[in-house]
Image (cartoon, rainbow, N blue to C red):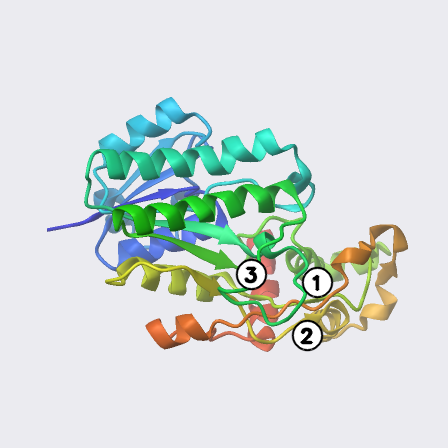
Amino acid sequence: MTKNVLILGGDGQDGVILSVKFLSAGYRVISVGRRNKSRLLALKLINKSLIDKKFTYFSCDVSDLVKLKKVLTLGNPSIVINCAGVSAGSAMTQDIDFHMHQTFYPVKLICDWIVNHKIKCKFVQLSSREVFGLPAALPINELTPRNPRNNYGVSKKISDELIFEYRNKYQAFFCSAIISNHVSYLSKNEDLMKKITLFCSKAEKLVTFGKKMKIGSLSTRRSWLSAEDVCTCIFKMSQAKRADDYVIGSSISTSIETLLDISFSYCGLAWQQHVEIDNALNHTDDDCSFICDSSKAKKDFNWSPIEDMEIIVPKLINDCAMRLT
C-alpha cells in the first residue's frame, strides 16, 4: 500500500529535494507551500508520471492554522516533514511574534493533532544550527547547550523542546533535524555561497561590464555541505524505527576566502580582481568557525556527507549557469 508523506514548506530548497526523494521511494507526496503553483512541477526534476500519479500540491501558509489543520486531515499522512519557516538573512531578526507564528505554533498544532487523535504518524521537524547561537566549544553536537542569538533561533529552540517533551511524554515518533549551512541551486540568492557561485556563473557578462561583488570578512568560516546530503539524512531519520534528534552538518569548516578561491579559480579568474571588501558587511559576532559533529547520525544511519567543497562549488556554478541560459 502506498504511504503518504506531507511536506510543509514544499516549495523551499529542502522541500523540493525531499519531495523527489520520497516520490522516488514510492511514496505519495502531499506538498504544502506559499506559491499558487508547485515549484517542483516547474523544475522537471523527476519523471512526470510520478508527479501525475503521486503528487498533490496545496497552497497554504503554515501560519494559517485553520487551513493547516484542514490540510493535515485531508492528507492522511504516515509521515509529516516540516521544512516551513522564514530563515534567510534579515528575516532571522524579525520580532518574536512573527517567528512564533511561522515556526512554533504550526509545530504545536501538528504535535497536538497527532497525539490527541492517536494518529500513527511520524513527525520530523527541521531545526537549525541557530539554536546554538555562538557556541563556547566546537564542534557542536546534540549535547551542545542551546543559546540562540536571534528570534529565529529562539522559535526553533522552543519547537525542539516541545518535540523532546512530547516524544518522551507520549512515546510519539517526533524528532528534530538540527541542520547546518547547506546549499544547492535551489537556495535563496542571498545565501552567501549561492551569491558567490551565482556571480561566477555570470562572470563573463559581469566582468565585461566591470561589475564587482561585495564581501565582508574573508576569515569567517562555515561548515557548508550540500542540500542533497542533508536531505538524505532527513529521509533516513523518517525511516528509522526509533525517534531521536540529530545534528546534521560537516566536520570541515571553510573560510570565505577559500570559498572565493575555489569558485573563481574554477572559472579561470582571480577573485581579488572581482571582489570588493566592504567592512560595512562585517558582523563581528559572525566571524567564528562553526564545525559539526554528526557522529550520531553516522552511527545510527551510516550517513556522512558525500560532497565536499571541491564538488559542491563547481556543481552549483554549473547548475546556476544552466538555468540562466
Q: Amino acid at mark 2?
A: Tyr
Q: CA distance from mark 1 to mark 3?
A: 24 Å
Report the residue marked by disc 1: 200
Report the residue marked by disc 2: 266
Q: Amino acid at mark 3?
A: Ser
Q: In this rendered view, identify the residue nearer to me: 214 or 265.
A: 214
Crowd band around label 1 with a 10 angstrom C-alpha radius: few (<14), some (14–19), many (20+)? many
Q: Amino acid at mark 1?
A: Cys
Q: CA distance from mark 1 to mark 2?
A: 9 Å
Report the residue marked by disc 3: 180
Crowd band around label 3 with a 10 angstrom C-alpha radius: few (<14), some (14–19), many (20+)? many
Residue 301 image position (x, y, % from top left):
34, 72
Residue 240's place in the image compared with 63, above or below, is below
Q: Are marks 1 and 2 in contact (CB under 8 Å)?
A: yes
Indicate left or right for 230 with 195 as reference: left
Q: Residue at x 83, y 52 (%)?
A: 281
Residue 139's place in the image compared with 160, above or below, is below
Looking at the image, tell me whether mark 1 or mark 2 is earlier in sequence order: 1
Q: Quadrant of residue 8?
A: top left
Q: Residue at x 36, y 33 (%)?
A: 109
Q: In this rendered view, identify the residue nearer to me: 241 or 90.
A: 241
